[in-house]
Image (cartoon, rainbow, N blue to C red):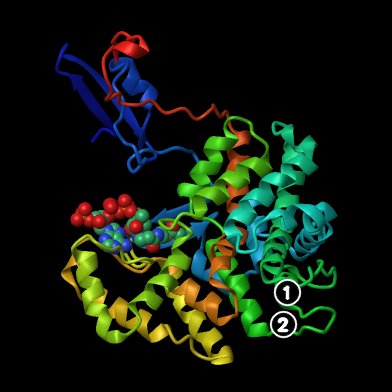
């Protein structure tokens, strides 16, 4: 059987055969037969926007692999920085490569003192941490003007290190500002995740001992969030990056996309939803409201996964390890009950709606002491290597500026009337 499709334009009787290559058909071939006829696919649900070697996921089989390695194995064997190295370089590091990668990141973890003295101080006291993160990541662009030379791979590599290194410092500083406690600077003696926890929670100059179970759980959560192919925020970053915008503005755009409740903001929305439901006896009426289309079950459903999200399974296990140390999140039982009810209900079964990564991650972050407004910021720290791997991959390929077409549905040509005659 031929690996191709044939299309006939019934207006003219002309036909064209297009090869199927790696599950794709070349739209340029399609346009040879049908110039000016566009794929009508506003949410890109059926459109491939990239040739990528970074992450493979299969929503029906329910697997996720970074550079070919199953997420379950990476979660068990590797630290977040090992996984970041893998995403960016295509191979896992040796011990020596990892040590020098960690050193590079450590050396770039500080931020200019203007962030603490001026920029962060300019926000309202109740400013949401994601808005602060988006703005401060964009502000990095003004501190590193040399980053604009994005076609030079060595310039790109330098900014990749800076962004991965500075994200936790910006995030923890945003938190410290919001609670009004003094900023804690990066500690060169600590590793990436310990350092972030120390910048977040160390009380002033006092000693701060990071619990190894919590540290490992957070590092694992970063690994699970590190990449997810052409998701909304990665696509936003690619679209912005395709104009050759600098990486800080590109990652800031990706962060903006992540903030929405249908994407990374869902981890925050899940907690707010569970709090609003309030008690077991309200679960049925909430589920009925979801089925009636009045509400959405946050943390459920996914564009690609039509099976249990493999990350959700790992997060659920990790949540229990964290609860063993800090005590159970009181919202856990409600979440478990909600999952049980939903997975037994035909509305969710027939639509293949399962918990996604965000259903249990918020409960875990909350038990670890992170305020709800920080949840999506934690997601952003984890996703930064993924965004950058896709940005770097795109710019090292023969890429063009992203520029979709549209199906115009507005008025045909008409004449402008002078204002008094309208
Ligand atoms: N609650 C209730 N119904 C849902 C949900 C949900 N969470 N998700 C999908 N559906 C319904 C849709 O209404 C639709 O019903 P219909 O066929 O009767 O019209 C059907 O299931 C199919 O869903 P789609 O609309 O095709 O889903 P889509 O791929 O467009 O959206 C999304 C995916 C945005 C993730 C959606 O499932 C959702 O809103 N989930 C809640 C928010 C969330 O958890 N987001 C995090 C996603 S993971 C991540 O980004 C990290």
- Say if mark 2 contacts mark 1, CB within 8 Å: yes
Helix or strand or loop: what does disc 2 sit on?
Answer: loop
Q: Residues within 10 Å of mark 2 (few under 14, many from 20)?
A: some
Residue 23, by quadrant, is top left
- Residue 374 coordinates in the image, percent (x, y): 58, 67
Residue farthest along the front direction in this orientation: 420
Q: Quadrant of residue 290?
A: bottom left
Q: Name above or below for residue 64 compared with residue 411.
A: below
Give the Cα distance between marks 2 and 1.
Answer: 7 Å
Question: Residue 215 location, x and y as percent?
Answer: 66, 78
186, 55: nearer the viewer: 186
Q: How crowded is the residue under tag 1: few (<14 C-alpha within 10 Å), some, or many (20+)?
A: many
Residue wearing tag 1:
194
- In the image, taking residue 145 as reference, residue 85 lies left or right, namely left
As drawn, 22 above or below 54:
above
Marked residue nearer the N-terminal end (2 or 1): 1
The residue indicated by pointer 2 is 210
Specify the quadrant that holds the C terminus. Answer: top left
Taking depth in this image into account, of 354 and 261 the one nearest to the observer is 261
Residue depicted at x 26% and y 81%: 282
| Rendered residue at 80%/73% (across/down) | 190
Q: Nearest the camera: 317 or 246?
A: 246
Q: Residue at x 64, y 41 (%)?
A: 249
**Dividing the image into four equal quarters, which quarter contains ligand 1?**
bottom left
Q: Is residue 27 left or right of residue 389?
A: left
Q: Is residue 87 visible?
A: no
Q: Is residue 259 at least partly visible in the picture?
A: yes
The number of callouts visible is: 2
Q: Report whether the residue tagged 1 is closer than 8 Å to ligand 1.
A: no
């Amino acid at each position: 059987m031929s690996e191709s499709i044939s299309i006939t334009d019934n207006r003219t009787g002309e036909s064209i055969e297009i090869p199927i290559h790696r599950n794709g058909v070349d739209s340029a071939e399609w346009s040879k037969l049908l110039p000016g006829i566009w794929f009508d696919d506003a949410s890109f649900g059926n459109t491939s926007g990239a040739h990528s070697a970074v992450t493979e996921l299969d929503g029906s089989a329910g697997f996720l692999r970074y550079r070919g390695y199953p997420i379950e194995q990476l979660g068990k064997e590797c630290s977040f920085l090992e996984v970041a190295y893998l995403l960016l370089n295509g191979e896992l590091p040796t011990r020596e490569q990892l040590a020098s990668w960690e050193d590079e990141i450590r050396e770039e973890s500080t931020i200019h003192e203007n962030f603490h003295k001026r920029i962060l101080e300019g926000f309202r006291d109740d400013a949401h941490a994601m808005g602060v993160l988006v703005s401060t990541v964009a502000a990095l662009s003004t501190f590193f003007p040399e980053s604009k030379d994005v076609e030079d791979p060595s310039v790109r590599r330098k900014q990749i290190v800076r962004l991965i290194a500075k994200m936790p410092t910006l995030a923890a500083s945003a938190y410290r500002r919001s609670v009004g406690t003094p900023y804690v600077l990066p500690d060169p003696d600590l590793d990436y995740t310990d350092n972030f926890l120390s910048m977040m929670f160390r009380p002033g100059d006092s000693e701060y001992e990071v619990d190894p179970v919590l540290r490992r759980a957070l590092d694992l959560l970063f690994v699970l969030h590190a990449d997810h192919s052409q998701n909304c925020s990665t696509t936003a970053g690619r679209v912005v990056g395709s104009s050759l915008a600098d990486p800080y503005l590109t990652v800031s755009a990706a962060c903006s996309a992540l903030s929405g409740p249908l994407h990374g903001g869902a981890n925050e929305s899940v907690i707010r939803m569970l709090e609003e439901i309030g008690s077991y006896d309200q679960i049925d009426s909430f589920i009925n409201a979801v089925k009636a289309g009045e509400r959405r079950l946050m943390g459920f459903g996914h564009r690609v996964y039509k099976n249990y999200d493999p990350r959700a399974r790992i997060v659920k296990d990790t949540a229990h390890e964290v609860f063993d140390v800090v005590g159970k999140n009181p919202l856990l039982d409600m979440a478990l009950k909600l999952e049980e009810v939903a997975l037994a209900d035909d509305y969710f079964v027939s639509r293949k709606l399962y918990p996604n990564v965000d259903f249990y991650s918020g409960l875990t972050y909350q038990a670890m002491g992170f305020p709800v407004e920080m949840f999506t910021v934690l997601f952003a720290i984890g996703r930064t290597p993924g965004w950058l791997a896709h940005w770097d991959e795109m710019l090292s390929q023969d890429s063009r500026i992203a520029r979709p077409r549209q199906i115009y549905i507005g008025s045909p040509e008409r004449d402008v009337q002078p204002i008094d005659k309208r």
